[in-house]
Amino acid sequence: MLESNLLPMIYILIIGVSVYFFVSSLFAKNEGEKALSWATGSEPEKSKSGLIEWSRSVTHQFTIQWAQRLKNPSKRKTIEKLLKTSGLSAELNVDEFIGMQILWGILFPVVLFVLNFALQYDYPWFIFVGFALFGWNIPVSHAKANRNMRQTAVRSDLPFFIDLLALATEAGLDFQGGIQRIVDRTRGKSVLAEELNSVLRDITLGASRAQALRGLSDRLDMNEISSFVNVVIDADSTGASIAKVLKDQSNQMRLERFVRAEKAGAQASQKILIPLMIFILPAVFIMVFAPVALNFMAGK
């Protein structure tokens, strides 16, 4: 009885919110453009994801002005860090990201409402809430997936890059020249090469080597990169040989990767027990004991 009284109210609320956002967007012609002003004054890069490109155009029309009104500094700082570590900061800014969360958080329950009304499914109210939360988290899930892919690629390439950098410095190049040589040969093929190119660009624009390397650590947010950056900065400050430090760091990275592989193998052997217990052992028991049970029930 309670659910039958709540559903019409939920339907009316969803329709009212949708109409409100649509009408408000018609009167907010320039607010979206103001909200999307980038710090550099340049246009955002075209995203590799078609979903983001489609969401961006709809977000500009309907939800960007509401995203601008969310002023929570902690929330905005968290989103800014997520965009930076996921490599999406050149494609999206904070206002766009929040606007997409609002867009998908409204779009999913609206679509569900239309289906529910047209096909008379009579979904309970909490299904709509679940779909709204799912839509709100779509941009977050996309950013986290990007971050995980970037970190996996960097973790795989880092020992090889450090080896090349050590060889370059032993051959007579300075640290910056070694990075430049590696970037020239691998740029466009590796996430780490693109990030090292950003380090060179920061140094060219006037940042110190330590500042540029700390920026690299902030963008990737990985223990391996933080360790590498700290070792290089310490070597600079103490005057130690960069080549020797880089070789030691490469050996350490390879050892850590070997330990991670061993740990993953041990976890895999434990996880395989789950399908074994759920699917394979019951089937074996049925095949072995079913004939015995049938004979016993038949009195033979």
Image: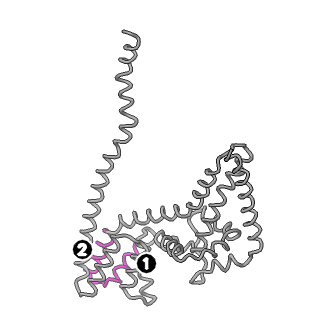
Q: How many neighbours does mark 1 have within 10 angstroms: few (below 14), some (14-19), or many (20 or more)? A: some
Instruction: Name the dominant secondary structure of the magenta segment.
Output: helix
Q: Which residue is mark 1?
A: 197
| Residue found 33% across the figure and 78% down from its top | 229
Specify the label residue 11 is tagged with.
none
Name the residue type under label 2: Lys
Q: Secondary structure at mark 2?
A: helix
Region rendered in magenta: 159-186
Is 104 left or right of 209, judged from the image as shown?
Answer: right
Q: Which residue is mark 2?
A: 247
Front-most of residues 288 and 202 = 288
Task: Answer with the quarter of the image where residue 40 lies.
Answer: bottom right
Please tell me whether residue 184 belongs to the stretch shown in magenta.
Answer: yes
Name the residue type under label 1: Asn
Residue 200 rendering spot, x and y as whole percentages: 41, 82
Front-most of residues 154 and 214 = 214
The answer for how far apart the CA atoms under marks 1 and 2 are is: 21 Å
Report the coloring of the rendering: one colour
Q: How many labels were placed on the picture?
A: 2
| Residue found 24% across the figure and 78% down from its top | 245
| Residue found 23% across the figure and 83% down from its top | 241
In primary-sequence order, the first of circles 1 and 2 is: 1
Residue 12 rendering spot, x and y as whole percentages: 74, 56
Is 262 left or right of 286, judged from the image as shown?
Answer: left
